[in-house]
Amino acid sequence: MSAIGAGSQGLWFVSRASGLAVLASFSAVMVLGVAQRLGSAPRRWPRFAVAELHRTLALFSVAFLALHVVTAILDPYVSIGWAATVLPFASGYRTLAVGLGTLAVDFGGAVLLTSLARVRLGWRAWRAVHWLAYVAWPVAFVHALTAGNDLRIWWVALAVWGSAVAVATAAVARLLEAIRPGTRSGRPTEGPAATSGQVMREATPGHARS
Amino acid sequence: MRAASSHHQLADSPGPRLSQLPRLLAADPWAGPASLAEHIGRYGLPPSPGLDQPRRRALIDEVAQSGLAGRGGAGFPAARKLAAVAARHRALVVANGTEGEPASAKDKVLLAVSPHLVVDGAVLAAEIVGADEVTVVVHHAVREIVDAAADERRRAAFDRVRIQVATGAGGFVAGEASAVVHWIERGVATPALTPPRLSERGLRGRPTLVQNVEALAHLALVARFGAAWFRKAGTPEEPGSMLVTILGAVPDPGVHEVAIGTPIDEVLGRAGGPAAPLPALLLGGYSGTWVSAAAAALPYSSASLATLGASVGAGLIAALPGDACGLAETARVVRYLADESAGQCGPCLFGLSAVAGEIQRLADGRLSDLSTVRRWLGQVDGRGACHHPDGVVRLVRSALSVFGDELERHSQGWCCATGTASVLPVPVRRHR
Amino acid sequence: MTGAAARLRVNPIACDGRGLCAEILPELITLDDWGFPVIRDGDVPDGVYPEAREAVRLCPKLALWLER
């Protein structure tokens, strides 16, 4: 944004930068989540590595997000208010755009909290909430388009739209898997049993697994 | 209406000539289901243990002394099940007459001939375990009969507990205890993983006694006539009588009541005896065991059949005629069993189908190498949430053993069978 | 971190044969011909107990547990 005031450009800059970082890492988390589910990862990557990476990057995203939110609220030149961290459309500044960001935090927060407690919750409850990630991401994306003014910078635009393409591709792949189970959309982990397992399963007439 | 008798007054009750068979099927099967009045006339009034603990405890002891075991295939001691559920609160009773085994008819026949005996047993079990409700799950073929019997009892205010009747799900695994509970609760007949046991957490989360209808009918008689009477038939380790379904190469297939321990050829004699020398018998059910015809000399009891790796199971005895191919029959049954997998567990869903394919190839003479199917049998055994895959493994292993000569011939392109009719009935594939 | 006599069990209904467990714990878990885990009988040896807990944690279907 063009200088609304000279003083705390630092805070605002960090907020913008960390915002971009959140979008990028959150997008990577989404892609990895789908990759883990479909078994489509570079051949040498064990599945547990993809799972761990998905989880670790998610936690990184939370860190960037915290930075993004706190610096934006602390910035004295925009009035957002602490309530807007979780209460959508409570911000005075750019109510709609910031509100979308808050919504994304709410949905993403639900996903995060249930994932941390997944053993206690049980798989069904965890999964039901985890789908909200597919809601959180587009909301966060629209927030990025409307709350920030940095898209004019070419590499920011590249990162933002590149993330969108990546996540959209992953989402389509996941959708296809959901409506046509067993689609061979990627290679399973190295290892004769695992590979032949996939082949054996698809050779079985009429099989369908969740 | 009900005599408040304790079991000490049992000797005074009218009833079938003690120790003689038939006990459960004493009524004339051609006369239709016995009415409540006929039932009481034949067997006497059921005793009511009342709600106090000492009487309930005494009845459990009587059942323990009788040595009554389950009649659904597993043969678990009835008294132990009763005690396990009686120790808990807010129990429920499910009388399991689903009979998912397509070739078995004993539960249907029992319910069609003596529905009140089964309901007596279910009500008695409920009073023992402190349940206020029984659900009698029956095959659709006998639903009307059991409904009528339950109505008759309600009109006469005969029982202290509520009786519900439900139609069981079709399908082979639908008769499994936890599948029946799921069916009643959610309309899906899929088995569940145990632990937790049904006696701890079953229907609606409450401790549930799931007992086969035949076992409950025996329970109703033990409560009337005592453990000593019950033991007058059968063997010391496996007392009592049991219902068997005899089919295949016999002139008079059907359900008969026999004392456990009767020699198998005598049991076959009840159905008219084998029409011709038999090569083999299938014992127990479709998840049972093939045995060679030489086994016909053995007593019909799980103890003696254990020497052949078999058991009485759900009371099925299928006589394979000399002109049939045991491998072809097995292949059809295994394909059916594979298709009947609940589809919940990978090894069962995929493994049984793979095994079925191999057995079919063996039957067709297109395969002679058994190493793959043996590896798969080992991989499937015990790897499901229920015992469905285990049963298929047992059936196939026994077939490979008993029909070893046939296998040899098949691998050379020959088959002994001259008949074309299938022996073991397999339902037409349903769409799930 | 000692094992204190625990068996690794799999819930075959929950298990989808994703195979992460076999990657983490090849000492105890092999995959059958269809990609589903076959767990070796007996208690988890102390040496691989951390990996066993890891497998339990990472299973995408929460199908594994350690039974005392």
Image (cartoon, rainbow, N blue to C red):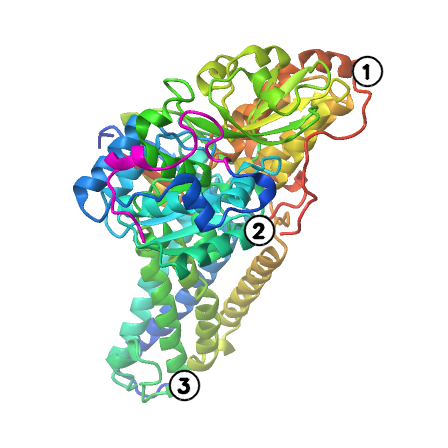
Label 2 environment density (alpha carbons within 10 Å; few <14, some 14–19, many ≥20): some
- Residue at the (45%, 55%) spot, across then down: B150
- Given this view, does label 3 or label 1 mark the residue nearer the observer? 1
- Identify which residue, B324 or A161, lies in the foreground: B324
Q: Which residue is mark 1?
A: B414
Q: Is residue B409 visible?
A: yes
Query: Which chain is home to disc 2?
Result: B
**What is the quadrant of residue B228 in the picture?**
top left
* Labels 2 and 3 positioned on one and the same chain: no
Above or below for B345 versus B153: above
* Residue A63 pos. (x, y %): 31, 62
- Given this view, does label 2 or label 3 mark the residue nearer the observer? 2
Disc 1 marks a residue whose amino acid type is Trp
Magenta-tinted stretch: B1-26
- Do the CB atoms of the residues marked 2 and 3 lie less than 8 Å apart? no
Q: Is residue A173 left or right of residue B15?
A: right
Q: Which residue is mark 2?
A: B140
- Residue at the (37%, 81%) spot, across then down: A98
* Labels 3 and 1 positioned on one and the same chain: no
Q: Is residue B22 left or right of residue C10?
A: right
Q: Is residue A106 left or right of residue B213?
A: left
Label 3 environment density (alpha carbons within 10 Å; few <14, some 14–19, many ≥20): some
- Identify which residue, B414 or A62, lies in the foreground: B414
Disc 2 marks a residue whose amino acid type is His
Query: Which chain is home to disc 1?
Result: B
- Do the CB atoms of the residues marked 3 and 1 lie less than 8 Å apart? no
**What is the quadrant of residue C12 in the picture?**
top left
Q: Which residue is mark 3?
A: A96
Q: Is residue B344 visible?
A: no
Disc 3 marks a residue whose amino acid type is Leu
